Image: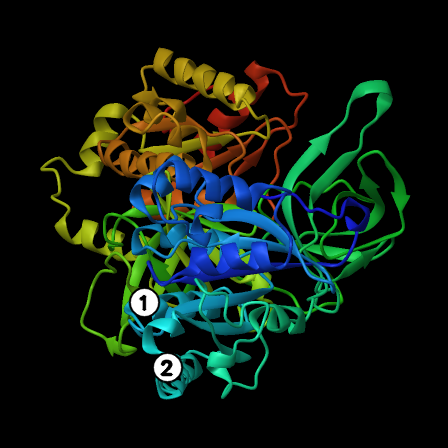
Amino acid sequence: MSTQISDQTAIDQERLTLVVAGHVDHGKSTVIGRLLADTGSLPEGKLERVKATCARNAKPFEYAFLLDALKDEQSQGITIDAARCFFHTAKRHYILIDAPGHIEFLKNMITGAARAEAALLVIDAHEGIQENSKRHGYMMSMLGVRQLAVVVNKMDLVDYDQSVFEQIERDFTEFLGRIGIEPVAFVPVSGRNGANIAVRDDATAWYEGPTVVEQIDLFEKLGPPVDLPFRFPVQDIYKFTEQDDDRRIVAGTVSTGRIAVGDTVTFHPSGKSSTVSSIEQFSAPEAQQAEAGEALGFTLDTQIYIQRGELMARADDPPPSVSTRFRANLFWMGGAPLIRGKSYKLKINATRSPVRLVKVLNVLDASELTSITTKDQVDRHDVAECVFECPKPVAFDLVNDIERTGRFVIVDNYEIAGAGIVLEALGGEESMLQEHLRERETRWEQSAITQGERIGVYRHDAKFVVLTDRNDSGDVARELAKKLEKTLFRRNFKAYYLGVNNLAAGLDADLALEEFGRGRQVRRLGELARIFTDSGLIFITSVSELDEYDVRTLELLNKPNEILVVAAGGHSFDRYTPDLSIPAETDLDSAVRQITELLRKKEVILEYHI
């Protein structure tokens, strides 16, 4: 749903993105309709056609009908999506985002407000400030919209009473101040009558401030944040192979700052560094520098292995925070409450990671802004301060340092269920995994057969053998693991191979293909290893592209038994030394001999002879 800009010759004129929010039935759509009509931004004949349609249906004309293009909106009388429309003044062009006012559609409002440079918040003078008015104010604060003007609508219903307007101005200014927003203006209007939308009205002669259109033109156009530290979320890595092209292009969009060819960069959380060799753009010549807002790619002078989701920063800029735990403010919109113990998906910058709620510090009552510290879950439409934990470190900035890289959303059941801002990186506490292991070992019921008795019968000790490679398919490690199993089995050792893909059968099919599913697979594999090694088996598995955090998870889950890690096919770790590294050119038989020899040296196999 959108109108067309009438002056196509000014298409490159300055534009500002403006979001309009407000409680349901406070007249937001009417105000927007008036804005479009009174600024001459409607397509020719649009207003007349809508009026004619209303006349044919014996329905009183409303300016809100100019926006009600969606069938559901017309039938329900509420705006159900964050729709865009366009209008212009003599100063500039505007992209206007009509954010839903009904409480059920706040997630759409968040989507719209996240792109806004300024905001209008509509309050009904007759009905007054509502809880959702405060929720919308809080969301503007959370999303970093600092240019906010409050439009007090339906002044005609209170006979343009100055005292009513001033009471709303006092109360809402006090509320906004408590959440860190200083409103730039309060404007008394009547959307239905057009008072103070584009033209002043004698009924509010007591008001000396700007009209809505004048206030919109007073909003400052926010330039790209080029003066902040450089941040580049890695969205993908493209590899080229044709015509001896061995480039790897790190692709994404610059969030903040500037970068130039020759600058040293560091990727977080991996900590790997390199130098920018070139800046690549689609269908454009190579550039020597880039800045915030540009979508492009980089080549590096050294080929380092990095993954999607890393945060690229200039080495001479302050680095982002890297942690598995963080404290955040969150607005929860999910149909089910946010609870401890359940795994959700975190989306922060280009990172996609499993995340769990560790603790609810307090829940904010949006109607009164009082804190509730006794809740152990976050219910729908709650605003809460929480501690979250990811299984692996993620990179982010604190929202007070760099706002754009300090925002996140949480997905539950394929839907965005929460939106928040990072307040603090945490560390040094017992992780949820360690807490689980402590409880598991406390409850663990020991077998009546000792490990020594099993060794005496099996002629070997128990061991969890993990093979990994850097092949996306994992073929190298898988083939070697199966060959090792067969070799040990033929020598009458109790060996068993389990492929990590077997564990996907118990997971949602689509989750098994993502990092979200990968984390579950690794954890389930570690739990099984604890059982198999406790039974005295040589338990073998293969996992492609295993990293040090996966290894540490498997080591923890397999305790008190030990793990043996074999890196095959030339695979290497960043900060972890495997028990055995097998070069890519090594044949299978030789590789198996190296592993079995290592098992003998570690006294896992007690009667092995070459």
- Compared to 73, does 492 lie above or below? above
User: Residue reaching furthest top?
Assistant: 490
For residue 239, above or below residue 229:
above
Q: Residue 609: x percent and y percent?
A: 45, 20
Residue picked out by circle 1:
384
Q: In this view, does 397 lie to the left or right of 425?
A: right
Q: Which of 471 and 184 is in front in this view?
A: 184
Could you classify mark 2 by the number of other residues whose Cα lies within 10 Å: few (under 14), some (14-19), or many (20 or more)? Answer: some
Please name the residue shown 57% across and 26% down the image.
472
Among numbered discs 1 and 2, the one appearing first in the sequence: 2
Q: What element carries label 2?
A: helix
Q: Mark 2 points at which residue?
A: 168
Left or right position of 392 against 607: right
Residue shown at the point (68%, 21%) measured from the top left? 585
Quick one: which residue is furthest to the left in this view?
Answer: 448
Residue 106, quarter of the rendered image: bottom left
Please tell me whether residue 501 is drawn above or below residue 302 in the rendered image: above
Local SS, label 1: strand
Quadrant hosting residue 190: bottom left
User: Disc 1 and disc 2: Cα gap in Å?
Assistant: 26 Å
User: Is residue 55 in sight in this rendering?
Assistant: yes
Seen from the viewer's position, the closer of residues 111 and 290 is: 111
Name the residue nearer the viewer: 100 or 482. 100
* Dot 1 amino acid type: Ala
Q: Give yes or no for contact between labels 1 and 2 (Cβ–Cβ under 8 Å).
A: no
Q: In this view, does 258 lie to the left or right of 41?
A: right
Callout 2, which amino acid? Answer: Ile
Indicate the position of residue 462 as horizontal and vertical percent values: 31, 33
The residue depicted at 50 percent of the width and 54 percent of the height is 33
Is residue 67 visible in the rendered image? The answer is: no
Q: Which mark is residue 196?
A: none
Instruction: Mark 1: give few (<14), some (14-19) or many (20+) Cα within 10 Å.
Output: many
